[in-house]
Image (tube, rainbow, N blue to C red):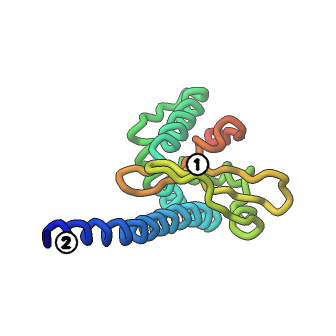
């Protein structure tokens, strides 16, 4: 009888404590999402492009690499994928040209100083942050994805269909 009572007591304690741990885990996840998003836009604004690169998803990176290689091919310049990837990782000349061009079309200050942020859907491996610019009627829904245990911003996954492809090769 004592074992039964102890077992019931143990399950009751677990049932009461588990939601508190779940809420703490969710808060930690949201903090990580907000941190990587803020870091992305701050690094863009500061011209810290290696940090910008580390904040985005692998899918976004691959889109950017493919776009750069396509632009290179248009002007008959050889740009092997490993070289382009390495250049972006180290904020080399191609990365600087790409991000400088990107930032001529997009001002991260609008997101950092003139918008309110909210939490949209949050699932195990993907989430959304809503960004409401003060002069917009509708918020942007920034997509985030968890990769290797870390949240990354899906820059291309969010904006690809409506973005301007910067020309980086002259």
Cα separation, mark 2 vs mark 1, equals 46 Å
Q: Quadrant of residue 44?
A: bottom right
Residue 93 visible, this orientation:
no
Q: Position of residue 55 (x, y in %)?
A: 49, 57
Residue 138 visible, this orientation:
yes
Vertical comparison of 170 with 22: above or below: above
At x 47%, y 31%, the residue is 78
Q: Position of residue 102 (x, y in %)?
A: 67, 49
Identify the image quadrant of the C terminus: top right
At x 72%, y 38%, the residue is 162
Q: Secondary structure at mark 1?
A: strand
Q: Position of residue 43 (x, y in %)?
A: 57, 65
The residue indicated by pointer 1 is: 143
Vertical comparison of 39 with 142: above or below: below
Q: Position of residue 156 (x, y in %)?
A: 59, 42
Task: Answer with left or right where residue 9 lies relative to residue 120.
Answer: left
Residue nearest the observer in this picture, 32 or 88 = 32
At x 57%, y 54%, the residue is 96
At x 42%, y 66%, the residue is 19
Do residues under tags 2 and 1 come within 8 Å of each other at their CB atoms? no
Identify the image quadrant of the N terminus: bottom left
Task: Answer with left or right where residue 165 lies relative to residue 84.
Answer: right
Disc 2 packing (10 Å; few <14; some 14–19; many ≥20): few
Q: Secondary structure at mark 2?
A: helix
Number of numbered callouts drawn:
2
Q: Of the residues tagged 2 and 1, which is closer to the observer?
A: 2
Vertical comparison of 107 with 102: above or below: below
Residue nearest the observer in this picture, 17 or 110 = 17
Task: Answer with left or right where residue 105 lies relative to residue 126.
Answer: right
User: Is tag 2's residue or tag 1's residue first in the polypeptide sequence?
Assistant: 2
Q: Any mark on residue 51, and which?
A: none
The residue indicated by pointer 2 is: 6
């Amino acid at each position: 009888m004592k074992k039964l009572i102890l077992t019931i007591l143990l399950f009751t304690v677990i049932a009461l404590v588990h939601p508190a741990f779940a809420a703490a885990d969710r808060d930690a996840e949201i903090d990580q999402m907000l941190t990587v998003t803020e870091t992305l836009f701050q690094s863009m604004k500061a011209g810290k492009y290696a940090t910008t690169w580390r904040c985005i998803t692998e899918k976004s990176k691959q889109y950017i690499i493919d776009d750069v290689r396509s632009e290179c091919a248009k002007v008959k310049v050889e740009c092997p994928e490993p070289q382009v990837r390495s250049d972006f990782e180290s904020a080399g000349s191609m990365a600087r040209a790409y991000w400088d061009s990107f930032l001529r079309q997009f001002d991260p200050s609008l997101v950092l100083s003139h918008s309110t942020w909210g939490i949209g859907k949050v699932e195990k491996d993907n989430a959304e942050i809503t960004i409401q610019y003060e002069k917009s009627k509708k918020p942007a829904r920034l997509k985030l994805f968890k990769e290797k245990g870390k949240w990354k911003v899906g820059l291309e996954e969010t904006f690809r269909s409506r973005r301007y492809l910067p020309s980086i090769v002259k």
